[in-house]
């Protein structure tokens, strides 16, 4: 089992397949993707070595992220490879959802259990303004297809200062009938967008108080769950989650490690730098990778340093998929 010096165990791997994305979200890639080409990202064989190493060290959940992971032509093959890795019990992915209506059923058949989709507004004009793509209709159709395919669906929306009561009420009305988990995420500062963070960051604390006052009740976390505090209400088909990285003791429940599309291990979303292990993955030696992971985990800090304005190596969230 992967365990750090603070007694935290790591059952969960977030694996980025690409940094590329064809959306231009204000809080991530407002000017579009301008990063490395696809030939610089991990190959399927390197990914297989990585998955076997993590699984043999107790990892039971893998999330495939990007950028936008479905931009890889071999995405379906990698999804099946992940699902068929011995020891991996749960496979999730994060996507902008624009291709989901067409592919949700195939993803389910390949072994996917859960999908997370970003929807920052249910108003088409506001959605287009935030994402740079007028595709809300396609994304909502994708959600319907995912639910029909019996995938567990979570929807992510970033809290911004212009997040109004009307926008919240529209989401709550939608959750009355929509059986998904809607997760409100505090905006996190990144190296490329410090001014945007200063202008738009909003704490999730007041929203949490509002939910509790209105009868929302906390759910018990699974061991491989992410950092969200999740709530349910008997009158709603959907659930609500809050991800508040600036809250007290946020890092105590950390159970995940990240590997970037270039093969670097990130002990935290906001690590000072990734730790390169590409050579080990290229050589395909699972035992060497396992030894490397155990050794590196001893260097993991107790907490991130976001409160100090230190964003580490994370220039934008597409680098590691959040």
Image (cartoon, rainbow, N blue to C red):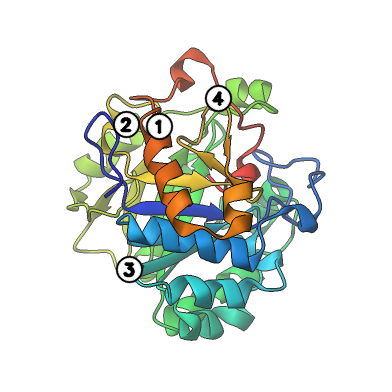
Nearer-the-camera pick, 121 or 77: 77
Eyeballing the image, is 184 above or below 97? above
SS of the residue under disc 2: helix
Residues packed near mark 1 inside 10 Å, few (<14), some (14 to 19) or many (20 plus): many
- In percent of the image, x 40 and y 56: which residue is there? 54
* Any part of residue 117 in sight: no
Please name the residue shown 64% across and 43% down the image.
319
Can I make out residue 193 in this image?
yes
178 sits to left or right of 126: left
- Whichever of callouts 3 and 1 sits on the residue coming sooner in the sequence is 3
What's the residue at 66%, 32% (across, down)? Answer: 315
- Where does the image place residue 130, in percent across and percent down from the top left? 67, 46
Q: CA distance from mark 4 to mark 1?
A: 17 Å
User: Contact (CB < 8 A) between labels 2 and 1?
Assistant: yes
Question: Could you give the CA–CA distance between mark 3 and mark 4, rounded to whole angstroms?
Answer: 30 Å
Mark positioned earlier in the residue sequence (2 or 1): 1
N-term mark: 4 or 1? 1
Label of residue 245 in the image: 1
| Nearer to us: label 2 or label 3 | 3
| Residue that label 2 marks | 250
Q: Residues within 10 Å of mark 2 (few under 14, many from 20)?
A: some
Residue at numbered disc 3: 87
- Alpha carbons under labels 3 and 1: distance apart: 29 Å
Indicate the position of residue 9 as horizontal and vertical percent values.
26, 44
Q: What element does badge 4 sit on?
A: loop
Whichever of callouts 4 and 2 sits on the residue coming sooner in the sequence is: 2
Packing grade of label 3 (10 A; few <14, some 14-19, many >=20) is: some
Check the image and report above or below for 307 versus 132.
above
Q: Earlier in the sequence, mark 2 or mark 3?
A: 3
* Disc 4: which residue: 272
Please say if the residues under marks 4 and 2 sit with CB atoms less than 8 Å apart: no
């Amino acid at each position: 089992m992967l365990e750090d010096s603070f007694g935290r165990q790591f059952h969960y791997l977030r694996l980025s397949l690409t940094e590329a994305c064809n959306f231009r979200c204000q809080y991530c890639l407002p000017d579009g993707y301008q990063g490395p080409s696809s030939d610089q990202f991990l190959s399927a064989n390197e990914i297989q070595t990585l998955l076997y190493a993590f699984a043999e060290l107790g990892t039971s959940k893998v999330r495939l992220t990007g950028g936008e992971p479905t931009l890889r032509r071999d995405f379906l093959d990698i999804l099946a490879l992940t699902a068929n890795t011995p020891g991996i019990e749960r496979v999730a992915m994060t996507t902008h959802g624009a291709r989901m209506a067409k592919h949700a059923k195939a993803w389910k058949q390949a072994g996917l259990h859960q999908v997370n989709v970003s929807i920052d507004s249910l108003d088409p004009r506001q959605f287009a303004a935030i994402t740079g793509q007028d595709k809300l209709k396609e994304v909502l159709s994708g959600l319907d297809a995912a639910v029909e395919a019996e995938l567990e669906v979570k929807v992510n929306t970033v809290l911004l200062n212009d997040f109004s009561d009307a926008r919240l009420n529209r989401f709550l009305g939608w959750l009355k009938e929509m059986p998904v988990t809607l997760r409100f995420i505090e905006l996190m500062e990144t190296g490329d967008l410090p001014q945007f963070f200063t202008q738009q960051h909003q704490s999730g604390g007041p929203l949490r108080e509002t939910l509790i006052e209105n009868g929302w009740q906390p759910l018990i976390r699974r061991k491989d769950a992410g950092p969200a505090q999740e709530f349910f209400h008997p009158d709603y088909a959907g659930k609500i989650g809050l991800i508040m990285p600036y809250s007290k003791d946020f890092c105590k429940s950390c159970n995940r490690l990240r590997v970037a599309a270039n093969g670097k291990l990130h002990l935290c979303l906001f690590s000072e730098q990734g730790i390169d292990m590409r050579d080990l993955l290229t050589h395909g030696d699972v035992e060497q990778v396992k030894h490397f992971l155990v050794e590196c985990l001893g260097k993991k800090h107790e907490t991130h340093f976001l409160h100090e304005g230190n964003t580490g190596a994370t220039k934008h969230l597409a680098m590691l998929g959040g």
